[in-house]
């Protein structure tokens, strides 16, 4: 089922405590220019590594077909902040790629030990 980015973020933020999403849109276009993610750094302190950081950056770019780029650094990643710029004016931009990447980050990339969140 295809889900709009804003609907995904609203639904996710209402029903999950581990991650909070926010987005900024370009005025009049409705297209996202960036997505931010917040989470508890303390909860994932044993998960963080340079390898995990590099995997996050590489997979975000690949899964988004070159339309999403992690712009925060490893320091902020280890402190519960990820900022992603979105190239939503590119010819290959599709909102479903953005939703898919965000879902992958929360459900597959980060360990999910607490299924009840």
Image (spheres, rainbow, N blue to C red):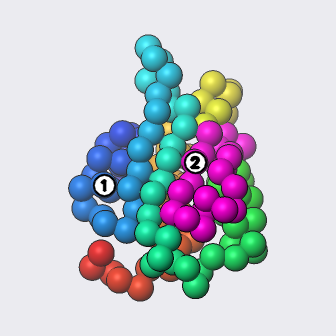
Image quadrant occupied by the C terminus = bottom left
Query: What separation in Å lies between label 1 and label 2 (alpha carbons)?
Result: 17 Å
Task: Residue 85: give x, y in percent of width and height.
Answer: 62, 39
13 vs 94: above or below: below
Task: Residue 8: give x, y in percent of width and height.
Answer: 35, 48
42 vs 104: above or below: below
**How many numbered marks appear?**
2
Q: Are marks 1 and 2 in contact (CB under 8 Å)?
A: no
Q: Is residue 19 magenta?
A: no
Can residue 91 be seen from the camera position used here? yes
Task: Residue 6: give x, y in percent of width and height.
Answer: 36, 39
Please tell me which residue is depicted at 75% across the width and 72% down the height of the picture. Answer: 50
Find the magenta span and give its range. 64-85
Residue to which mark 2 is pinned: 83
Please tell me which residue is depicted at 75% across the width and 74% down the height of the picture. Answer: 51
48 vs 65: above or below: below
Residue to which mark 1 is pinned: 13
Question: What is the crowding at mark 2: few (fewer than 14 residues within 10 Å), some, or many (at least 20)?
Answer: many
> Which element type, helix, strand or loop, lies under badge 2?
strand
- Tag nearer the camera, 1 or 2: 2
Q: Left or right of 76: which side holds 112?
A: left
């Amino acid at each position: 089922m295809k889900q709009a980015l804003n609907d995904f973020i609203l639904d996710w933020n209402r029903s999950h405590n581990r991650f909070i999403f926010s987005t900024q849109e370009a005025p009049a276009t409705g297209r996202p220019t960036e997505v931010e993610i917040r989470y508890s750094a303390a909860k994932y302190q044993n998960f963080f590594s340079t390898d995990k950081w590099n995997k996050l950056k590489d997979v975000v770019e690949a899964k988004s077909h070159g339309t999403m780029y992690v712009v925060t650094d490893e320091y902020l990643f280890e402190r519960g902040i990820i900022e992603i710029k979105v190239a939503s004016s590119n010819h290959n931009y599709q909102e479903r790629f953005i939703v898919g990447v965000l879902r992958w980050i929360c459900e597959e990339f980060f360990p999910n030990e607490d299924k009840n969140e």
